[in-house]
Image (cartoon, rainbow, N blue to C red):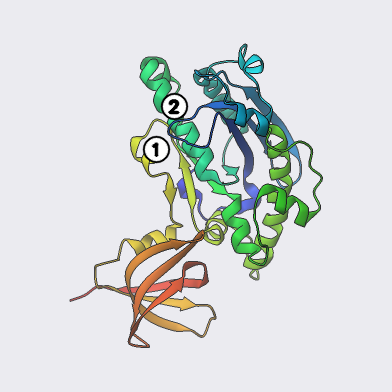
Amino acid sequence: MTDLLAWDENISNFRFVAWDTETTGSSPSNDHLVELAALAFDEDFESRRFETLVRPPCPMPAEVIKIHGITDAMVEPAPSSLEAFERFFEFLNWVGHPRLLLAHNAGFDVGIVNGEWRRVRGEDRRRADARAQSAELVLDTCMLAKTLLPELPQHRVESLATHFKIETGRLHRAMEDVRVLHEIFLRLLGLAADRSAKPGSGLTLNMLIDIAGGYFVLNPSNADARNHPFRLPPRIAAIEALCGSQAKVAIIYEVEQDYRYITPIAIKMRAFKVYVEAYCHRDNTKKTFRADKILRIGRVEQPC
């Protein structure tokens, strides 16, 4: 994976890979990949593109063709999904480390790749295992946009492109979606840097994941990652580990002066936001805290 020991790495040191898929339908578990595209870049310039059509094992539904325009004739000479994955993984290896993958509504794209890999592994296990890729960290730009731009009524690629005045061609083709996503992410990255700016420090991977409310793991060869690809930010995961333990955790909430102890009860997600349900010892009542407003986590007092 993008090295999970690099949480404190400045985001300016990362290489980014915006990627997108087109499919035969909307079900990650039942539908198939028909196009895969990616664009590698850093904060200054684009470096290389990857794109391929993919031959699915079934005819293209007519209603899906109306969306992306990819026909059976177009995918007939295309590589199989396993061959496409091999080329995609080679592309990622070329990009190098540290890298961060980006997808809009990442849960779908991660789900479709993980589901497709599970099927092709059943067909050619030896070859699939030989080509298995290490895990990749995937940031969901939709989750990031929802936190940074809560005033927008919608956070689709089209809506964000309009907001940022980014020209679009034919969306719902993977490479055009990726090109626009690249531009959207750079705008969001600027907003995230402004939000997290502190004297003498820059935006780190940890801070960016915190703002987004979590990340996804793309790891087709790992059953746990396939079935549970979403992960909480590291500091919220640390609080989750204490849920049910009766431990008291010191937190700074919303403003530097708001210091309190809480006993975590549960972690919940609503509308792409992560919340900590906890007993607040200062106010002697159960409360719900927005995870992105917990500025710092301090001392942990375990129950006697």
Residue 96, image quadrant: top right
Asked if residue 61 shows in the view, the reply is yes
Mark 1, Cα crowd under 10 Å, few <14 / some 14-19 / many 20+, is many
Asked whether the residues under the numbered discs 2 and 1 touch, taking CB atoms below 8 Å apart as contact, a structural biologist would say: yes
Compared with 242, 159 (above or below) is: above
Which of the pair 249/119 is nearer the observer?
119
Can you give x and y, in whole percent of width and height, for residue 90 in the image?
Answer: 57, 24
Compared with 170, 123 (above or below) is: above
Which of the pair 14/251 is nearer the observer?
251
Residue type, mark 2 in image: Trp
Q: Residue at x 66, y 63 (%)?
A: 149
| Residue at mark 2 | 117
| Residue at mark 1 | 226
Q: Residue at x 65, y 57 (%)?
A: 154
Which of the pair 73/149 is nearer the observer?
73
Residue 63, image quadrant: top right
Q: Residue at x 47, y 72 (%)?
A: 296
Q: Secondary structure at mark 1?
A: helix
Can you give x and y, in whole percent of width and height, for residue 221 in the image?
Answer: 39, 30
Q: Is residue 171 left or right of residue 5?
A: right
Q: Secondary structure at mark 2?
A: helix
- In the picture as drawn, the residue positioned furthest to the top comes out as 77
Cα distance in 3D space between marks 2 and 1: 10 Å
Asked if residue 2 shows in the view, the reply is no
Residue type, mark 1 in image: Arg
Tell me, for residue 155, which label it has, or none: none
